[in-house]
Amino acid sequence: MTLRQSLLATTVALGLLAGCSRNATQNQPAESGGTPSAPAQPMPDEAIKPAEEPPSGGTAAGAPAVPGTPTERGPAVFFVKHSGVRCMAAPCPTYNASRADRPNEDPLPVTDVDLSALPMSEEKRAGLLEATMHAGIKVEATVETVPNAGPAGAATVLRVSKLVQ
């Protein structure tokens, strides 16, 4: 095995271990002449940590904390946009949710957007998720962290209660 093949094999193995990659608007050509690739970006530490519990020992909703149950945060208005992240292991931070009242904060990586509370057909819900890939959507929602949701760890679910214009 040549040095170039060893380096390529190591790079591929590390890429598979990373699990996620981000689609960039400016793709760089691969050295091997294959398909373009984009550099992987690490997830912020905030996305990995579960939500902090109130000092009373319960969840934000007031229920006692039980291992394996989701932890919730209060409702807020978010601007949701597709992140461009593609993963090999679930849960994957597919969306970015930015607080409308805090435009200078970094967006929250979100693994799922739950639109089931909205009174609309499945086609319209699919259309809303498609809109996140282009302009994004503005919603009122709560953030829920589900520990051990898959091989990649905890999931961050945005539970949408209504659309905001």
Image (tube, rainbow, N blue to C red):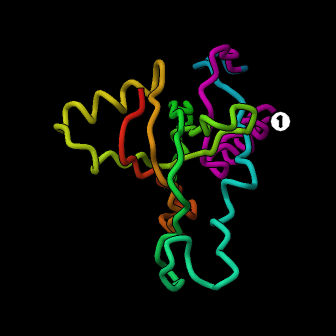
Q: Residue 88 colored magenta?
A: no
At 68% from the left and 63% from the top, the residue drawn is 49
Work out which quarter of the rendered image holds the C terminus and state it.
top left
Q: Quadrant of residue 154?
A: bottom right
Q: Residue 28: which quarter of the image? A: top right
**Left or right of 81 in this view: 100:** right
* Residue in the picture at 58% in, 19% down: 35
Which residue is nearer to you in this view: 151 or 131? 131
Estimate the x, y position of residue 115 in percent, counting from the top left.
Answer: 32, 45
Image position of 102 with respect to 17: above or below: above
Classify 73 as above or below 162: below
Place of residue 162 in the rendered image (x, y in percent of width and height, measured from the top left):
36, 42
Instruction: State whether residue 31 is above or below residue 11.
Output: above
Report the amino acid beneath label 1: Leu
Residue 83, x across and y down, in percent = 56, 33
Q: Position of residue 82 (x, y in %)?
A: 51, 31
User: Judging from the image, what secondary structure is the residue with disc 1 in?
Assistant: helix
Q: How many labels, in total?
A: 1
Quadrant (top left/top right/bottom left/bottom right) for the N terminus: top right
The residue under label 1 is 3
Most extreme residue toward the right, as rendered? 3
| Region of the chain picked out in magenta, as a range | 1-30
7 in magenta: yes
Please tell me how crowded label 1 is: few (under 14), some (14-19), or many (20+) other residues with Cα within 10 Å. Answer: few
Seen at 67% across and 43% down, the residue is: 15
* Of residues 58 and 70, the one drawn nearer to the viewer in this rendering: 58
